Image (cartoon, helix red, strand yellow):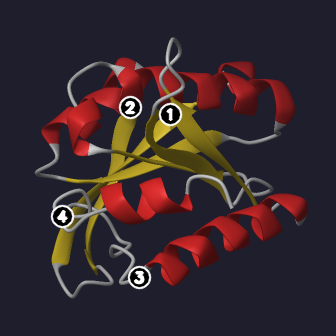
């Protein structure tokens, strides 16, 4: 189970402030996340990737495309604290968008993000995303998120 320790250590309360999931309470929960990700990929319901620094292979975080067989697959990402502010989020989401364009049939990609998470909001905006709705959602830690949902157009559909 590669990266379960890194996920357990780096997916913290601070990192999940603006996210739906909560941090793992123990290493077993991190391991369950890895196992569930593998099962979901085998069943083709989502694609989950580990983000590694190119030159050193240092663990930076995880990202994914959920609901990959729908008309509106959903992008998600988290980076460990020390990786913030380096453009890794944009680079990763852009790569996932390219993969989706080459491998999936969809109308638009969806990128939900908390209204207050300005750095994360810049990612879909740089990719031509537009806000299509705003809503509240209580995350698994009990915090009410103020979400804005971006849709990033599929260039094959324009």
Which callout, 1 or 4, points at the residue further toward the start of the chain? 4
Observer-nearest residue: 42 or 101?
A: 42
Nearer-N-terminus badge (1/2): 2
To which residue does mark 4 refer? Answer: 17
Q: Which residue is mark 2?
A: 124
Task: Look at discs 1 and 4 and give the one toward the viewer.
Answer: 4
Task: Assign the C terminus to one quadrant of the image.
Answer: top right
Can you identify the residue that label 3 sits on? 26
Location of the N terminus by quadrant is bottom right
**Can you give x and y, in whole percent of width and height, for residue 124 in the image?**
38, 31
From this viewpoint, is residue 107 visible? yes
**Tag 4's secondary structure?**
loop
- Residue contact at pointers 1 and 2, CB within 8 angstroms: yes
Q: Give the CA separation, mark 1 to mark 2.
A: 7 Å
Secondary element at tag 1: strand
Residue in view at x 60 percent, y 73 percent: 31
In the rendered image, the residue lying farthest to the left is 116
Residue 81 or residue 4, whichever sits in front:
4
Q: Report helix, strand or loop for mark 2.
A: helix
Q: Alpha carbon of mark 1 to alpha carbon of mark 4: how far?
A: 24 Å
According to the picture, the residue beneath numbered tag 1 turns out to be 152
Q: Nearer the viewer, mark 3 or mark 1?
A: 3
Give the Cα separation between the discs numbered 2 and 4: 19 Å
Q: Secondary structure at mark 3?
A: loop
- Quick one: 26 or 148, which is closer to the camera? 26
């Amino acid at each position: 189970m590669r990266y379960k320790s890194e996920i357990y250590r780096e997916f913290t309360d601070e990192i999940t402030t603006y996210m739906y999931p909560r941090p793992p309470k123990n290493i077993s929960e991190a391991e369950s996340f890895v196992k569930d990700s593998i099962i979901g990929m085998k069943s083709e319901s989502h694609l989950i990737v580990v983000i590694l620094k190119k030159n050193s292979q240092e663990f930076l975080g995880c990202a994914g495309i959920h609901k990959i067989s729908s008309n509106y697959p959903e992008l998600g990402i988290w980076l460990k604290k020390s990786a913030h502010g380096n453009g890794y989020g944009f680079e990763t989401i852009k790569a996932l968008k390219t993969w989706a364009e080459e491998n999936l049939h969809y109308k638009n990609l969806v990128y939900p993000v908390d209204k207050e998470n300005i750095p994360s909001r810049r990612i879909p905006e740089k990719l031509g995303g537009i806000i299509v709705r705003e809503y509240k959602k209580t995350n698994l830690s009990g915090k009410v998120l103020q979400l804005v949902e971006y849709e990033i157009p599929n260039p094959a559909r324009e």
